[in-house]
Image (cartoon, rainbow, N blue to C red):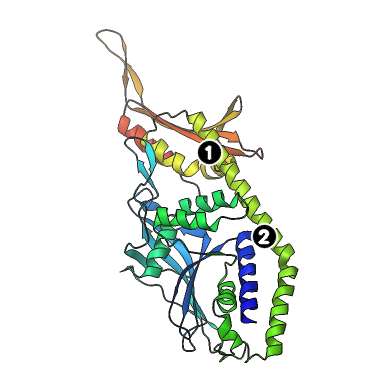
C-alpha cells in the first residue's frame, strides 16, 4: 500500500509541477517529528529599492517565503516577506551611457543580508489564528536556507528567463533546470519546482507529499482538531481513491493553469520581441546620462503612461513611429544697440531642454515606448541641465 501510494503521489507531483510551476522547495531540514520545509513563490519577486537609491550599488528584492513545521510546539506555518540586499543585476554607467549585465551574480553559499519585511505573520497551531510578525532590522547570515533564498531573489530576472525558456518545451526538463541553476547561481541541482504558491498550498503540499507517512500513522499534530485522526486500512484505501478522483477532477483546472502559464510566456515573448525592435530603432547610439536613466525605466511602457505622467505632449508621426515631445525653457534675453557701432547686442540667459518619447506598436497594436531622447541647449549649460532634471520623470 505504501509503495503504491508513494508512486501515485510521485506521478501527481510531476504532472502538477509541469502544468504550472509557481513555487519552489528552497530548503528542508530536521529529523522525523521535527522537520521544517521552506518554500518560495518564485513568480512574484518585488523590487523594494527606494526611489532615491535606484541605479545605486545595492538593490533590495522581496521574496515571499513560507516555512511549514512538523513539530507540535511550532506554528503550522510562518509567512515572511523577506527582503534581501542584492548586487544590481544590471550595471549602468551614466558617463559612458552603457547598461550591462552584472557578471558577479549573487550565489548560494554567500552571506545573505536580509530583514523580515511588513506583512509577515505566523499561523498558530493551537487555534489556527494568524499573528503578525514584527519587522526586523537588517541582519547577516550564511544559513543555507537564507543563502539559497537570496540567490533566487537577487537573480530574479535571469531565474524567470530560465523558467520561460525551459517551459517552451514539453515536458519540462527538470534535469536541465537543475544543472542551469547550479551553474549560474550555485543552487542545488535537485531543487524542485512545484505547483503551489500560497502558504496554505505549501502546508497541504508538505503534509501530502513530504510527510504523508506521519499523516497515515495518525501522528500529525492536531491541537485545533482540524486535521486527521489515526487512519484505518479502509481510511487509507479511501484516501488513495480520493487522490485518484481528485486528480481526474482537477485535470481541467490544471489545463487552465497551464494555459495561463503559456499565455504569460507568450506575453513575455512579445515583450522581448518589442524590446528587440526598440533596440533597432535606437541603432546603438551613445546615450547621455539622462537618456540612460530614462530608457532603463520607460522602454516598453504604454504611451498612455507617458501622457499620464508627463502631461499633454507635442505629437508627431514619422512612418511607423510616433513622437511625444516635451519642452522646458528659460529665456530672459534682451537686446541693446551698441552706441559706437550701432550693432545689436544680446544680453541675458537662454536655456532649453526637450525630452522626446518615440513609441511603436507591439503585436497587439498597443503603442509602447521604444526610445527616449534628451537634448539640452542654450547659452548657460548648467541651467539647461537643471531644466532636463525637471523633465526627467519616472513611471509610477
Most foreground residue, 171 or 48: 171
Pointer 2 or 1: first along the chain: 2
Residue 316 image position (x, y, % from top left) = 58, 27
Circle 1 residues within 10 Å: few <14, some 14–19, many ≥20: some
Task: Name the residue: 61% across, 86% down.
Answer: 216
Most foreground residue, 289 or 72: 72
Q: Is residue 192 visible?
A: yes
Task: Name the residue: 57% across, 67% down.
Answer: 197
Residue closest to the far left: 340
Task: Name the residue: 48% across, 69% down.
Answer: 65
Residue 259 image position (x, y, % from top left) = 68, 55
Tally the numbered discs.
2
Whole-number angstrom distance, CA of label 2 to CA of label 1: 27 Å
For the residues labelled 2 and 1, say whether their Cβ atoms are less than 8 Å apart. Answer: no
Res 15 quadrant in image: bottom right
Mark 1 sits on what residue?
275
Please say if 312 is above or below 380.
below
SS assignment at label 2? helix
Please say if 181 is above or below 37.
above
Looking at the image, is mark 2 or mark 1 nearer the viewer? 2
Task: Name the residue: 57% across, 38% down.
Answer: 273
Which quarter of the image is occupied by the N terminus?
bottom right
Please say if 94 is above or below 127.
above
Q: Which mark is residue 257?
A: 2
Res 345 quadrant in image: top left
Residue 181 image position (x, y, % from top left) = 45, 56
Query: In the drawing, does residue 315 fall left or right of residue 59?
Result: right
Amino acid at each position: 500500500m505504501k509503495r503504491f501510494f508513494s508512486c501515485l503521489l510521485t506521478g501527481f507531483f510531476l504532472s502538477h509541477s509541469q502544468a504550472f510551476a509557481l513555487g519552489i522547495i528552497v530548503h528542508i531540514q530536521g529529523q522525523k517529528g521535527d522537520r521544517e520545509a521552506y518554500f518560495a513563490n518564485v513568480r512574484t519577486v518585488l523590487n523594494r529599492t527606494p526611489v532615491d537609491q535606484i541605479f545605486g550599488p545595492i538593490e533590495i528584492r522581496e521574496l515571499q517565503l513560507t516555512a511549514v513545521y512538523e513539530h507540535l510546539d511550532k506554528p503550522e506555518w510562518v509567512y515572511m516577506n523577506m527582503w534581501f540586499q542584492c548586487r544590481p543585476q544590471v550595471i549602468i554607467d551614466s558617463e559612458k551611457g552603457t547598461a550591462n549585465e552584472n557578471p558577479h551574480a549573487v550565489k548560494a553559499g554567500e552571506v545573505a543580508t536580509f530583514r523580515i519585511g511588513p506583512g509577515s505573520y505566523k499561523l498558530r497551531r493551537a487555534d489556527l489564528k494568524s499573528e503578525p510578525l514584527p519587522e526586523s532590522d537588517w541582519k547577516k547570515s550564511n544559513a543555507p536556507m537564507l543563502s539559497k533564498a537570496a540567490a533566487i531573489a537577487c537573480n530574479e530576472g535571469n531565474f524567470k528567463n530560465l523558467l520561460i525558456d525551459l517551459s517552451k518545451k514539453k515536458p519540462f526538463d527538470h534535469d536541465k533546470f537543475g544543472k542551469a541553476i547550479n551553474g549560474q547561481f550555485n543552487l542545488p541541482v535537485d531543487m524542485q519546482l512545484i505547483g503551489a504558491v500560497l502558504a496554505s498550498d505549501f502546508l497541504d503540499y508538505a503534509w501530502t507529499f513530504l510527510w504523508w507517512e506521519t499523516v497515515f500513522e495518525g501522528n500529525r499534530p492536531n491541537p485545533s482538531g482540524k486535521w486527521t485522526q489515526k487512519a484505518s486500512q479502509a481510511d487509507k484505501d479511501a484516501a488513495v481513491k480520493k487522490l485518484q478522483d481528485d486528480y481526474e477532477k482537477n485535470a481541467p483546472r490544471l489545463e487552465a493553469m497551464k494555459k495561463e502559464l503559456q499565455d504569460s510566456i507568450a506575453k513575455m515573448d512579445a515583450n522581448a520581441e518589442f524590446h528587440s525592435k526598440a533596440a533597432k530603432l535606437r541603432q546603438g547610439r551613445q546615450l547621455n546620462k539622462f537618456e540612460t536613466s530614462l530608457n532603463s525605466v520607460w522602454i516598453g511602457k504604454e504611451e498612455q503612461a507617458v501622457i499620464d505622467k508627463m502631461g499633454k505632449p507635442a505629437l508627431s508621426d514619422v512612418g511607423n513611429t510616433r513622437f511625444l515631445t516635451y519642452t522646458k525653457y528659460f529665456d530672459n534675453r534682451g537686446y541693446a544697440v551698441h552706441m559706437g557701432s550701432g550693432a545689436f547686442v544680446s544680453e541675458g540667459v537662454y536655456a532649453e531642454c526637450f525630452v522626446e518619447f518615440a513609441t511603436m506598436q507591439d503585436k497587439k497594436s498597443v503603442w509602447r515606448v521604444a526610445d527616449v531622447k534628451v537634448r539640452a541647449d542654450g547659452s548657460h549649460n548648467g541651467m539647461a541641465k537643471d531644466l532636463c532634471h525637471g523633465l526627467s520623470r519616472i513611471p509610477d
